[in-house]
Image (cartoon, rainbow, N blue to C red):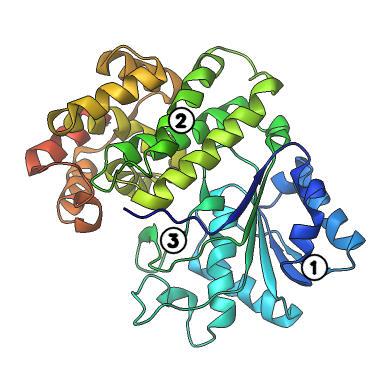
C-alpha cells in the first residue's frame, strides 16, 4: 500500500489571503490561467492578484481556457508564459483551468514537446514548473491530483495525459461557489460523487486510500437534500461541498477514475455534454455491475450516502442530472471503443465482460431516433 499526496493543501474561508506567503513562495512571475469570465466574477482572480500585487510578484492573465481545454489553447498559453518569462503557473477555475495550468507547466520546461504530443507516453518522467490551484467549482478535485484531461481535436481525443503533475499548492475556499448557478453546483457535485464511487469500486482501493472516499461520501450524503431540493444551495454548505470535492480528488489521486469517467469522454467530445452529467449518466449502471463483484463495497457506498438501494441511487442521479439519449449507431460505437480500453477496464474490481459493458450503455443512454 502506498499513500502519496505531495500538494500543500489548505481548505478554509479567505484561504488565498490567509496563505499569501505560501503563494508568494512558489514563484515571482506567474501566468494566471482562467476561463473567460467566472474567475473575475466570483472574486477568486481578484484575491490572487491582490496577494501578488502586495508581494510585488509579477503576473500575466491568460483568460482563454475553454471547457475541455484543447492542445491549441495550450500552445497559445505556453507561448504567453514564455514571452512573459513565467516561473510558475496559477490555475483558477474548474477542472479545465487547473488541468490546462498543469499541462502548460509541463510544456514550459520542455520546449522539445509540442502540445499535440502530450498524450504520448514519455520515455522518462519530465519536470514541470510549479502549479498553484485555486478551484472555484465543487467537482474537479484537480487541485490534489496529478492528472490533466486534455482534448486534441485533430485526432478526436479527450483523455488524461500520461504525465504526473501534482500542484505545489492548493488554496480551496467555498465562497467562490456563491456566484455559481445551482445547475453548475449540481453538475460538479455529481462529478465529485463519481470520483469517490469510482475510487471505492476500484481494483486499487485499499485501507489507506479508502479513508478519503468513505469520509467524503458521508459529507456528500449530508449535502444531497440541498442539491435535490429546488432553489439555491444554502451558503452554509459551500465550504462542505468544496471540502468534499477536494477529498474526492485525493481519492482518485490514488486509484484513478474508472469506467464512468472513461465512458463520459466520448459523450463530452462528440455530444458536448458537460463533464459532471456525462459521468453521472453512467454511474448507477456501473455501480449495479460492481455489485456482482464487490457487493459489500456497494452497500457501504449506499449507506454512507444515505440511499436505500440501487433503485434509490438511480432515481437520485436522474433527479439531479436527468437522462440522455444518443443514436444507436453512436452508442454502439462508444461501447466498441470501451471494450478495448484496457486502462479503464483493468481498474474494475472484477472480471467485467463485453455483456456488462453493453448493459451499462443500454441502461445509461436512451436511443434517440
Ligand atoms: Fe471528473
Quick one: label 3, few (<14), some, or many (20+) residues within 10 Å?
many
Instruction: Name the element at disc 2.
Output: helix
Q: Quadrant of residue 167?
A: bottom right
* Residue marked by disc 2: 215
Confirm or reject: label 2 Cβ below 8 Å from ligand 1.
no
Q: Residue 257 appears at what percent x and percent y?
A: 35, 47
Q: Residue at x 17, y 44 (%)?
A: 332
Between the residue at mark 2 and the residue at mark 3, the CA separation in whole angstroms equals 32 Å
Res. 81 visible in picture? yes
Left/right placement of residue 72 relative to residue 263 reads: right
Give the mark nearest the N terminus, 2 or 1.
1
* Above-or-below relation of 116 to 7: below
Q: Quadrant of the C terminus?
A: top left
Between the residue at mark 1 and the residue at mark 3, the CA separation in whole angstroms equals 26 Å
Q: Residue 94 appears at what percent x and percent y?
A: 59, 47
Instruction: Name the element at disc 1.
Output: strand
Q: Quadrant of residue 125?
A: bottom left
Left/right placement of residue 197 relative to residue 224 reads: left
Res. 318 visible in picture? no
Quick one: label 2, few (<14), some, or many (20+) residues within 10 Å?
some
Q: Residue 261 appears at what percent x and percent y?
A: 34, 45
Instruction: Name the element at disc 3.
Output: strand
Between the residue at mark 2 and the residue at mark 1, the CA separation in whole angstroms equals 37 Å
Q: Residue at x 62, y 75 (%)?
A: 78
Callout 1 touching callout 3 (CB < 8 Å): no
Callout 2 touching callout 3 (CB < 8 Å): no
* Residue marked by disc 3: 151
* Residue marked by disc 1: 59
Of circles 1 and 3, which is in front?
1
Give the mark nearest the N terminus, 1 or 3.
1
Number of callouts: 3
Amino acid at each position: 500500500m502506498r499513500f502519496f499526496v505531495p500538494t500543500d493543501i489548505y481548505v478554509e474561508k479567505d484561504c488565498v489571503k490567509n496563505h499569501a506567503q505560501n503563494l508568494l513562495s512558489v514563484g515571482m512571475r506567474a501566468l494566471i490561467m482562467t476561463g473567460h469570465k467566472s474567475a473575475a466574477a466570483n472574486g477568486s482572480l481578484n484575491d490572487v492578484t491582490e496577494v501578488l500585487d502586495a508581494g510585488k510578484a509579477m503576473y500575466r492573465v491568460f483568460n482563454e481556457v475553454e471547457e475541455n481545454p484543447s492542445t491549441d489553447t495550450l500552445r497559445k498559453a505556453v507561448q504567453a508564459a514564455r514571452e512573459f518569462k513565467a516561473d510558475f503557473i496559477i490555475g483558477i477555475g474548474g477542472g479545465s483551468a487547473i488541468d490546462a495550468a498543469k499541462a502548460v507547466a509541463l510544456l514550459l520546461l520542455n520546449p522539445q514537446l509540442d502540445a499535440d504530443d502530450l498524450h504520448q507516453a514519455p520515455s522518462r518522467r519530465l519536470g514541470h514548473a510549479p502549479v498553484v490551484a485555486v478551484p472555484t467549482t465543487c467537482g474537479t478535485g484537480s487541485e490534489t491530483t496529478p492528472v490533466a484531461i486534455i482534448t486534441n481535436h485533430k485526432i478526436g481525443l479527450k483523455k488524461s495525459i500520461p504525465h504526473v503533475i501534482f500542484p505545489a499548492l492548493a488554496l480551496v475556499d467555498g465562497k467562490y461557489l456563491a456566484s455559481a448557478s445551482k445547475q453548475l453546483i449540481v453538475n460538479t457535485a455529481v462529478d465529485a460523487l463519481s470520483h469517490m464511487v469510482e475510487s471505492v469500486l476500484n481494483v486499487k482501493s485499499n485501507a489507506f486510500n479508502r479513508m478519503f472516499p468513505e469520509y467524503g461520501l458521508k459529507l456528500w450524503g449530508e449535502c444531497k437534500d440541498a442539491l435535490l431540493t429546488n432553489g439555491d444551495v444554502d451558503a452554509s454548505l459551500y465550504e462542505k461541498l468544496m471540502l468534499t470535492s477536494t477529498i474526492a480528488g485525493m481519492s482518485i489521486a490514488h486509484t484513478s477514475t474508472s469506467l464512468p469517467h472513461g465512458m463520459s469522454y466520448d459523450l463530452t467530445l462528440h455530444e458536448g455534454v458537460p463533464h459532471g452529467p456525462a459521468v453521472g449518466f453512467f454511474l448507477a449502471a456501473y455501480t449495479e455491475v460492481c455489485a456482482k463483484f464487490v457487493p459489500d463495497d456497494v452497500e457501504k457506498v449506499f449507506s454512507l450516502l444515505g440511499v436505500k438501494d440501487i433503485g434509490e441511487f438511480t432515481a437520485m442521479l436522474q433527479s439531479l442530472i436527468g437522462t440522455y439519449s444518443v443514436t444507436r449507431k453512436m452508442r454502439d460505437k462508444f461501447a466498441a471503443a470501451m471494450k478495448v480500453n484496457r486502462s479503464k477496464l483493468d481498474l474494475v474490481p472484477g472480471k467485467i465482460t463485453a455483456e456488462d459493458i453493453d448493459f451499462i450503455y443500454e441502461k445509461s443512454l436512451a436511443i434517440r431516433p
